[in-house]
Image (cartoon, helix red, strand yellow):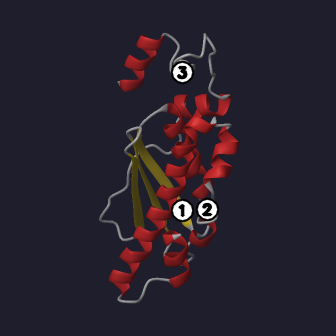
């Protein structure tokens, strides 16, 4: 519904944001990857938050109003992330960053996803400097989801959290 309204208002969807004040007609275009992930977001949705194999990361940027929820589903045996999903309230760059993050974490071990940096997401999407906070949110959401999963697992197993995961997620 929101996308339909946005498309009607902007005639062609969210493709060209308004130029900053004083930019004398200079228009910035979103990179085709941002547009693709905005128009066709991957892995939108949510998992049952009470599922012990799910970790949830909820992060936000008060300055711009973007809020991102990223969830991972982990195979307890292998420690691999078998599925991921997101819900994001924000601009096209925030939605695209969330979508890319969910694609990149699937099939990887939790320690491995903690090495995903916002700069890699920003480079992949060709985000302009004014939109780098969106990729930072995605990195923070990944770390928060891993930390949440590790703490849930520790509580259910009665074992201490895995030190490398907790330490990396706190970084």
User: For the view shown, which residue lies furthest in the left direction?
Assistant: 50
Image coordinates for residue 69, horizontal then vertical, percent: 40, 51
Front disc: 3 or 2: 3
Q: Are marks 3 and 2 in contact (CB under 8 Å)?
A: no
Closer to the camera in the image, 13 or 107: 13
Q: Determine crowd level at label 3: few under 14, some 14-19, many 20+ residues with C-alpha closer than 10 A.
A: few
Residue lying at 49% horizontally and 57% vertically, measured from the top left: 140
Residue lying at 40% horizontally and 78% vertically, measured from the top left: 153
- First in sequence, mark 3 or 2: give its number: 3
Secondary structure category for the residue under label 1: strand
User: For the view shown, which residue lies furthest in the front direction?
Assistant: 22
Q: Are marks 1 and 2 in contact (CB under 8 Å)?
A: yes
Figure label count: 3
Residue lying at 44% horizontally and 48% vertically, measured from the top left: 86
The residue singled out by tag 1 in the image is: 82
Secondary structure category for the residue under label 3: loop
Q: Are marks 3 and 1 in contact (CB under 8 Å)?
A: no
Q: CA distance from mark 3 to mark 1?
A: 41 Å
Front disc: 3 or 1: 3
User: For the view shown, which residue lies furthest in the bottom direction?
Assistant: 159
Looking at the image, residue 39 lies above or below residue 8:
below
Image coordinates for residue 169, horizontal then vertical, percent: 51, 70
Secondary structure category for the residue under label 2: loop
User: Seen in the image, is 131 located left or right of residue 57?
Assistant: right
Residue 70's disc number: none
Closer to the camera in the image, 63 or 88: 63
Image coordinates for residue 113, horizontal then vertical, percent: 60, 64
- First in sequence, mark 3 or 1: give its number: 3
Q: CA distance from mark 3 to mark 2?
A: 40 Å
The residue singled out by tag 2 in the image is: 107
The residue singled out by tag 3 in the image is: 20
Looking at the image, residue 53 lies above or below residue 99:
below
């Amino acid at each position: 519904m929101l996308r339909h309204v946005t498309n009607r208002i902007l005639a062609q969807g969210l493709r060209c944001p308004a130029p900053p004040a004083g930019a004398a007609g200079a228009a910035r275009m979103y990179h085709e990857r941002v547009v693709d992930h905005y128009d066709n977001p991957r892995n939108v949705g949510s998992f049952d938050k009470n599922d012990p194999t799910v970790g949830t990361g909820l992060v936000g940027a008060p300055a711009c109003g973007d809020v991102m929820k990223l969830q991972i589903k982990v195979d307890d045996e292998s420690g691999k992330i078998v599925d991921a999903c997101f819900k994001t309230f924000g601009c096209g760059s925030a939605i695209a960053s969330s979508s890319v993050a969910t694609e990149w974490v699937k099939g990887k071990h939790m320690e491995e996803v903690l090495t995903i940096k916002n700069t890699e997401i920003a480079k992949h999407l060709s985000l302009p400097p004014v939109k780098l906070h969106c990729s930072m949110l995605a990195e923070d959401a990944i770390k928060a989801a891993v930390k949440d999963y590790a703490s849930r697992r520790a509580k259910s197993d009665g074992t201490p959290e895995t030190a490398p995961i907790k330490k990396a997620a706190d970084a």
